[in-house]
Amino acid sequence: MQQLSLRTSMDKLFLFIATGAGSGYLPKAPGTWGSLVGVVLWLCLRPLALSTYLTVLAGLFIVGTMAAGAAEKLVDQGDPGLVVIDEIFGQLIALTLAPAHPLAAVAGFILFRFFDIRKPFPVGWLDRRIHGGLGIMLDDAAAGLLALAVLQAGLRLLGLE
C-alpha cells in the first residue's frame, strides 16, 4: 500500500471517494473489486426511477472526476490502480436498465470488465488521449456504454428484458 501525505481532510475525502471507500487498496485486481462495489451499489440504486438513477450517475461522474484527478496528484502517478471510482461508475452504466435477475448482473459485470480490460475503440482511444480525472472517468464510461449495449441486446434476445 502506498504511503501518502494527506494534508487536509479534503485530500482524505477525495482519496476515500477515488478508492471506492478503500476497495482500491484490495490486493491483486483493484479494478475488479471496484466493479464489484459498482454491482452492490447498483443493487441499492436499481429501485430508483430512471431519471433519478441517471441524475445519480451524473453526480457521480462530476464527483468522481474531481476525486480521481485529486488522487492522481496525491499519489503522483497517472491513472493509479488504487483509483476505482471509474470502475464503479462504468459498472453502474453497464447495468443501467438491467432487470433484477442474477444472470443480468453477472453478464453486466463480465461485459464491463471485458471492455474495460481489452479497451476496444473508443475505450482505448480515450484512455490514450484524455488524461487527468476526466480521462480516468471517460474511458470507463465508454466501456460501460459498450457493455450496456451488448447486455441489452443479449437480454432482448433471451427475452429477459
Image (cartoon, rainbow, N blue to C red):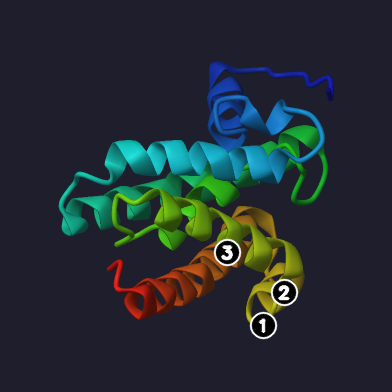
| Residue, disc 3 | 111
Q: Nearer the viewer, mark 3 or mark 1?
A: 3
Q: Provide the secondary structure element on which disc 2 rests.
A: helix
Q: Amino acid at mark 2?
A: Gly
Query: 10 Å neighbourhood of mark 3: few (<14), some, or many (≥20)?
Result: many
In the picture shown, does residue 66 fall above or below 145? above
First along the sequence among labels 3 and 1: 3
In the picture, the quarter occupied by the N terminus is top right
Q: Amino acid at mark 1?
A: Phe
Q: Amino acid at mark 3?
A: Leu
| Residue, disc 2 | 124
- The CA span between labels 2 and 1 is 6 Å
- The CA span between labels 3 and 1 is 15 Å
Residue at image coords 44%, 55%: 103
Residue at image coords 63%, 42%: 84
Whether residue 55 is visible to the viewer of this picture, yes or no, is yes
Residue at image coords 37%, 74%: 158
Toward the viewer: 34 or 77? 34
Whether residue 92 is visible to the viewer of this picture, yes or no, is no
